[in-house]
Image (tube, helix red, strand yellow):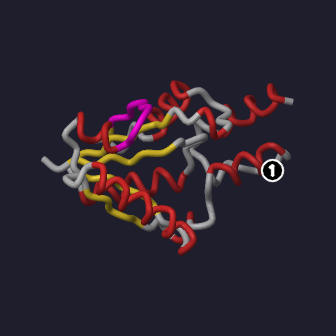
Amino acid sequence: MKGAVFAGTFDPVTNGHLDLMQRALRMFDSLTVAVAERAEKGVIFTQQERVEMIREAASSLGRITVEPFAGLLVDFARQRKIPVLVRGLRFISDFEYEFQMALMNRRLHDQIETVFLMPSETYTYLNASLVKEIARYGGAIDDFVPPNVAPRLRERLKQAR
């Protein structure tokens, strides 16, 4: 059984993330969504909240597990004997960073491969930072995030004011 890891901060999970999860499941028997701690990125949801939101949003997909992680992604994958990392590429500007990370991950553990997936063109412009910015100013975000995420994001941003 071939598994893959799709890692990120997911602060919050977006419909673009879900699109990539669905695409990965077409290629792999199972997908582990690894939710990074990443406090240095100024996340607005705790790691556990992000794990819960993804579990709820992806519950209909099946063959997905969602786990928190800290440290190096290759260590996380190696410990679970998962041989593939899935990364999303929206624009050519993403490629330089992702390529560098893929090469470093290969250097750290040469038995783990990186696969790049492109989201649906509907989601190429979408990222969690933009969604938070739109929500912060009262804009409509319902088309960008799963239904369970939008009210939580609005509430969290209200509390932060």
Screen quadrant of the C terminus: top right
The quadrant in which residue 110 appears is bottom left
Q: Nearer the viewer, residue 3 or 99?
A: 99
The quadrant in which residue 155 appears is top right
Q: Is residue 67 magenta?
A: yes
Residue 117 screen position, x and y as percent: 39, 65
Q: Nearer the viewer, residue 49 or 92?
A: 92
Q: Is residue 100 magenta?
A: no
Residue 14 screen position, x and y as percent: 56, 49
Residue 20 screen position, x and y as percent: 42, 57
| Residue located 48% across and 37% down the image | 36
The residue indicated by pointer 1 is 139
| Part of the protein shown in magenta | 65-73
Q: Amino acid at mark 1?
A: Gly
Give the side of residue 21 with respect to residue 110, left or right.
right
| Residue located 19% across and 53% down the image | 111
Residue sticking out furthest to the left:
1
| Residue located 43% across and 30% down the image | 68
| Residue located 68% across and 37% down the image | 42
Question: SS of the residue at dot 1?
Answer: loop
- Please determine whether, in this image, residue 29 is positioned above or below residue 159: below
Give the side of residue 97 with respect to residue 86, left or right.
right
Residue 95 screen position, x and y as percent: 49, 69
Residue sticking out furthest to the front:
107
Disc 1 packing (10 Å; few <14; some 14–19; many ≥20): few
Give the side of residue 150 with respect to residue 122, left or right.
right
